[in-house]
Amino acid sequence: MKNIRNFSIIAHIDHGKSTLADRLIERTGALSSRELREQVLDMMDLEREKGITIKAQTARLYYHSPDNQDYVLNLIDTPGHVDFSYEVSRSLAACEGALLLIDASQGVEAQTLANTYLAFQNDLVLIPVINKIDLSQANPDLALEQLESIIGLKSDDAILASAKTGCGVDEIFSSIVENIPPPAGDPDAPLKALLIDSWFDSYRGVIILVRVFDGVIQTGIRIELMANQATYSVEEVGYLTPRQLEVNSLSAGEVGYVIAGIKELNHARVGDTLTEKNRRTKYPLSGFKDIKPMVFCGMYPAGETGVEDLRKALEKLRLNDFSFQYEPENSPALGLGFRCGFLGILHREIIQERLEREFDIHLITTAPSVSFRVTTVEGKDLEIHNPSQLPSANKVKKIEEPVIEALILVPEKYLGSVLKLLESRRGEQKKMEYVSSQRIFLTYRLPLNEIVFDFYNNLKSVSQGYASMDYEFEGYREAPLVKLDILVNREPVDALSLIVHKDKAYHIGRSLVAHMRDLIPRQQFDVFLQAALGKRIIARETIKAYRKDVLAKLYGGDYTRKMKLLEKQKSGKKRMRKIGSVEIPQEAFLALLRIK
């Protein structure tokens, strides 16, 4: 065990984490030159396009040091976005150290800071690496200054590197071996292993990725997943190089995969403790929690896609992403569909893109919303994921909304614009401090409901791309919230209902019906669009009907002939409105995203 090192790479989005992993794999010869490609640990096209890691991978590297020692280095990759912070924390719990990667051209950013706090909570040894020093706009001196002033690590310990050219990679390997401690554990103790990740294989069932803390996992033993007490027989163990390589056993301190014929992905939850059935460990590893979705939206089939096609696609997608949840729902406006729950805004975007790309599904998605806690007059506590589930106003005692703590790093010249944006989203300032002469660190409390719409895009826009943000869930708090209904021809469309702050209801209702007027096509009859709070209409727009010129064939005669034709047309339009239906396009459901 003294020659094993378990480490991770943590960084802000697009600071070069996947490229550095490529260089480490290349330098140790874990893959042949034929198998190597750029961002080898990013398996999905979506990961490569967006420059983020969605599904974490691991790689076992063999390093021969200059002093003729052979080391096993387990690189435990982490997802690269705030939505997956729980998975990041579990990956870090499996390590003894981490490489803290900082882009020399961008410096310390919000997610760098958030991941550093997570690493400190897990008592990891941090090795700072200043990456991309080969860029013409690189400023390593500023990055080193920020490393000391913002994070508090010594700049003397930092390694200057370029993951693209391979510069500094040897120094990184030496630092990993010298500074990160070997794992501690007892191979003779009862088995205790942390479940880092899981995915579904069509032929082998669920494959789980584990870090063994005590004991040994070997083929044939009965194991128990402690969170739900499910037991299975181990069929195969091995490690990833990053391709699968079967071995006889995994001992304390090692990282590898286990195949045990698990058919249910919800039995293999990230953060769970794995032990031996006949020789159980007394206490599970700390830090396990159930992942709860925070953002919800409706997904309905469109075009040639049927509801069964969508159901099958969602089932297959969930096999590789347990944090994504869905349940059937029926909308009078859109028909049969599913109410889907996501970890955050980016997670929702990724799921939607994967459905459209991988399964060729055509979707109508409703505007995203969050979960609310409602206390009724009778004293019942309800959790509302869909605005249409909210009881009428006279039955509601109080509504609580989820609140986040946002960490924002912004250059001084854009401070005014960013503060204005935060105040407009009902933000409460907790802290503002200068971390360098030109950069300010803001800590704000914000309602999650205010950032699920285009908050991140607006933040980048008002700061010209220089501000960065990270957030964590803080809890729930009471707020004066109301249900805003949108009526089309006096019929409420449940898929367009929203729960909004009382002070913003009129503005949102007015803007929403104005946008929808431009998006819904004209019909043969007038279409009324209304925004309502309960029985009270607060905004209205009318989409005028197409109208045939019924007077064109007349060339004279008494005016009563004209009136007769116009009255006949009027009564026909009235009858049409009673029986006619209005098809609402996808753009109308996303009109809320365009409200300033």
Image: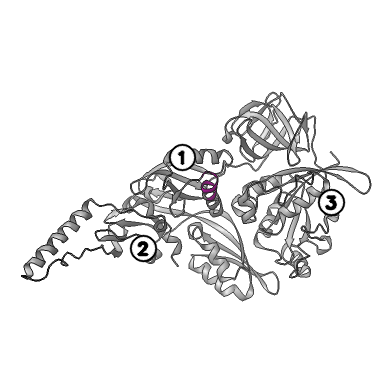
First in sequence: mark 1 vs mark 2: 1
Region rendered in magenta: 353-359
Give the percent coordinates (x, y) of residue 378: 35, 45
Dot 1, how many residues are within 10 Å of its Cα: few (below 14), some (14-19), or many (20+)?
some
**Residue at point 42%, 53% (across, down):** 399
**Which residue corresponds to mark 3?**
173
Q: Observer-nearest residue: 204 or 429?
A: 204
As shown in the figure, which amino acid type bears the numbered disc 1? Asp
Which of labels 1 and 2 is toward the front? 1
Q: CA distance from mark 1 to mark 3?
A: 49 Å
As shown in the figure, which amino acid type bears the numbered disc 2? Gly
**Which residue corresponds to mark 1?**
309
**Residue at point 74%, 65% (across, down):** 104
Give the percent coordinates (x, y) of residue 523: 28, 58
**Which residue corresponds to mark 2?**
509
Disc 3 is placed on an element classified as helix
- Inspect the magenta stretch and tell me whether residue 106 lies in it: no
- Inspect the magenta stretch and tell me whether residue 355 lies in it: yes
In the rendered image, the residue lying farthest to the right is 67
Q: Observer-nearest residue: 550 or 358?
A: 550
Q: Are marks 1 and 3 in contact (CB under 8 Å)?
A: no
Q: Observer-nearest residue: 108 or 585?
A: 585
Q: Is residue 212 visible?
A: no
